[in-house]
Image (spheres, rainbow, N blue to C red):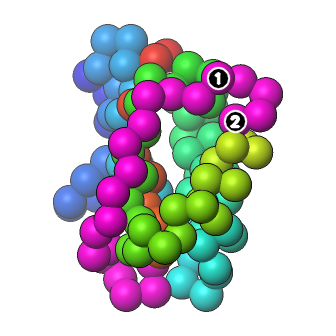
């Protein structure tokens, strides 16, 4: 098992055998839901690349929204990001996030 970008509470990337687990990625506090979603996906893309993978190898994603009112706007960004490959299995729910200005958090499991 390998862990990268580790701190006292979590690692950003964990690789076990041929599976990559990413910690939840969030946007910037001053962004709207579309920008926060794109920031999350951009961070995910960079972490997957670092781990030797890419979005086409994503197995599953969990999307947490501060409000389900943002579901459609988040999906517009999500669908565009996956326009060149098939998306992973996905769950989406509403949750209080770690900071009141965060609107979305995305976690990912991918193959190497």
* Residue 66 coordinates in the image, percent (x, y): 39, 74
Instruction: Give the answer, above or below, for where 15 lies relative to 111.
Output: below
Circles 1 and 2, Cβ within 8 Å, touching? The answer is yes
Going by the image, does 69 lie left or right of 9?
A: right
Q: Could you tell me if residue 53 is visible in this image? A: no
* Residue 40 coordinates in the image, percent (x, y): 57, 57
Residue 82 marker: 2
* Residue 49 coordinates in the image, percent (x, y): 62, 32
Going by the image, does 88 lie left or right of 66?
A: right
- Which element carries disc 1, helix, strand or loop? loop
Circle 2 packing at 10 Å, graded few (<14), some (14-19), many (20+), is few
List the single residue furthest toward the left.
9
Q: Which residue is mark 1?
A: 86
Residue 25 on the magenta segment: no
State the residue at coordinates (25%, 53%).
10
Going by the image, does 85 lie left or right of 46?
A: right
Residue 97 on the magenta segment: yes
State the residue at coordinates (41%, 74%).
67
Main secondary-structure element of the magenta-colored stretch: loop
In the image, 107 versus 33, the foreground residue is 33
Residue 2 marker: none
Instruction: Write down the quadrant of residue 55 in the picture.
Output: top right
Instruction: Give the answer, above or below, for where 39 lies relative to 80.
Output: below
Instruction: Give the answer, above or below, for where 109 lies relative to 38.
Output: above
State the residue at coordinates (45%, 86%).
101
State the residue at coordinates (20%, 60%).
9
Instruction: Give the answer, above or below, for where 90 lies relative to 41.
Output: above
Going by the image, does 85 lie left or right of 53?
A: right
Circle 1 packing at 10 Å, graded few (<14), some (14-19), many (20+), is few
Q: Which residues are magenta?
A: 82-102
């Amino acid at each position: 098992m390998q862990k990268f970008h580790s701190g006292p509470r979590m690692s950003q990337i964990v690789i076990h055998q041929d599976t990559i687990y990413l910690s939840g990625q969030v946007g910037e506090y001053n962004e709207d839901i579309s920008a926060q979603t794109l920031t999350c996906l951009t961070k995910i893309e960079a972490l997957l690349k670092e781990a030797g993978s890419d979005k086409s190898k994503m197995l599953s994603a969990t999307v947490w929204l501060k409000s389900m009112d943002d579901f459609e706007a988040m999906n517009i960004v999500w669908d565009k990001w996956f326009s060149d490959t098939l998306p992973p299995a996905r769950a989406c729910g509403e949750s209080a996030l770690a900071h009141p200005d965060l609107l979305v958090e995305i976690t990912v499991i991918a193959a190497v």
